[in-house]
Image (cartoon, rainbow, N blue to C red):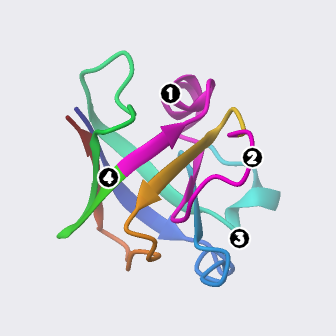
Amino acid sequence: MYKSIVKEIGELALSFEEEKIMILFGPQTPEGLRDMAVIHEAEEDQSESPVKEGHTLKIDDQEFTITAVGSAANNNLKELGHISIYFNEPNGEVLPGAVFASPHVLPQVKNGSVIEFKS
């Protein structure tokens, strides 16, 4: 299980509604990327690979099924707190840091929201 808390929401982070993309970054995010990211801090990280196809992404009381995971997503999440979550179907090859989730609705997120990846 992986659990983190949203600490800050960049000014442009929620402007990707049409594309249905949420970009997560850890607290050490460079200034130039903060505007477009949801900044979160891990509270619980008990799994080597917390993000797996078929597992659940939960943001507060909203639940999503992970449908595809890029080859670097778990490492990026652990090292940088960074992944890009697409709430749509992959269109071609899945990028290394990408995670796809269903249903295809961008979740509501706020400061203090709890993000969990669990089996």
Residue sitting nearer the eye, 70 or 29: 70
Relative to 23, does residue 107 appear above or below in the rendering? below
Q: Do the residues under discs 2 and 4 have CB atoms within 8 angstroms?
A: no
- Residue 58 picture quarter: bottom left
Q: Which residue is mark 1?
A: 74
Left or right of 90: which side holds 56?
Answer: left
Which mark's residue is nearer the viewer, 1 or 4? 4
Magenta range is 66-94
- Circle nearer the N terminus (2, 3): 3
Point out the residue furthest to the right here: 32
What is the number of the mark on residue 102?
A: none
Q: Is 34 covered by the magenta stretch?
A: no
Q: Do the residues under discs 3 and 1 have CB atoms within 8 angstroms?
A: no
- Residue 82 picture quarter: top right
Residue sitting nearer the eye, 6 or 109: 109
Q: Residues within 10 Å of mark 1 (few under 14, many from 20)?
A: many
Disc 2 residue type (three-letter): Gly
Between the residue at mark 3 and the residue at mark 4, the CA separation in whole angstroms equals: 27 Å
- Circle nearer the N terminus (3, 4): 3
Q: Residues within 10 Å of mark 4 (few under 14, many from 20)?
A: many
Disc 3 residue type (three-letter): Asp
Q: Is residue 27 visible?
A: no
Between the residue at mark 2 and the residue at mark 3, the CA separation in whole angstroms equals: 28 Å
Q: Do the residues under discs 2 and 1 have CB atoms within 8 angstroms?
A: no
**Residue shown at 37% from the left, 68% from the top:** 103
Disc 4 residue type (three-letter): Thr
Q: Do the residues under discs 3 and 4 have CB atoms within 8 angstroms?
A: no
Q: Is 74 covered by the magenta stretch?
A: yes
Q: Which residue is mark 3?
A: 35
The location of residue 93, given as percent across then percent down, is 74, 39
Q: Which residue is mark 2?
A: 92
